[in-house]
Amino acid sequence: MTSGIWLLFYDISAADRDHYVDWFHRRHIPEKLARPGYRWAAHFEAPAGPDNADLYHYIGMFGGNSTRVFLDPSPAQLKLTQSDETRAMMARRQNPSSAILAHEWSWFSPADAHAGTATDMPCAGINAPHIQILTIEGPAHDEMIGSACAQKLAPGFVRHEKAIACHKMTNVMGGPRHMMLFAQNDISPAARGCGPFDLPLAPDDLSVLTDLGDAVKMTTRWGRRICPA
């Protein structure tokens, strides 16, 4: 992985989906990758769920040399220079949120070529067929959350037969502060929803966080890779 990631969460209506995805892959990604410091891009999609059959869910990611790449210029400054087409396409996004992430460490499946290492893997992108992102927010419990990620969540996840790797990241733009990206070869139907309890982790792996109740907020989002195809 590179040391900085610009992360986007958003939804697109079924009516806008084809037009938007074509623009994002054919125009937007090449424009981003032409900027200094941008190294890779990835786009993940989850189909509409029973809660709203009209919305498709997306995770967009851009990898950079560092978080500085995405702060000079910042997202707010870039918005001032957007073309009319870009503004129109971004207006189609529903429920958007974003984060600029600093990569802390990675843990790999025993079957992965990087098994046993904890490297930032410069220049490497997120190319897993499926990902799940767990967001964790608990301002008074940052040390406990970090320890749980390192001691429980990461080793617990990579034992799963479909696991590729997990990556711990910190949001430099505020909350949620802690994020774990789980890269997998497949995601079971039960985990397509999805909540923290749907991750392929033993109950004990999450108990150190769930035992804190409302003091720690956790959400997850999943997607199937659609770019690179």
Image (tube, rainbow, N blue to C red):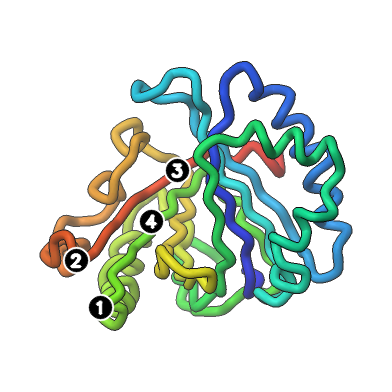
Q: Earlier in the sequence, mark 2 or mark 1?
A: 1
Q: Earlier in the sequence, mark 3 or mark 1?
A: 1
Question: 179 or 105: which is nearer to us?
Answer: 179
Q: Earlier in the sequence, mark 4 or mark 3?
A: 4
- Image quarter hosting the C terminus: top right
Three-letter amino acid code at the position of disc 1 = Ala
Give me the C-alpha separation between circle 4 and circle 1: 18 Å
Whole-percent x and y of residue 212?
A: 14, 67
Q: Is any atom of residue 154 visible in this view?
A: yes
Asked if disc 2 and disc 4 are in contact, CB closer than 8 Å, the reply is: no
Give me the C-alpha separation between circle 2 and circle 1: 8 Å
Give neighbour class at mark 1: few <14, some 14-19, many 20+ (Cα, 10 Å). few
Q: Earlier in the sequence, mark 3 or mark 2?
A: 2
Residue that carries the numbered disc 2 in the rendered image:
215
What secondary structure is marked by label 1?
Answer: helix
Asked if disc 4 and disc 3 are in contact, CB closer than 8 Å, the reply is: no
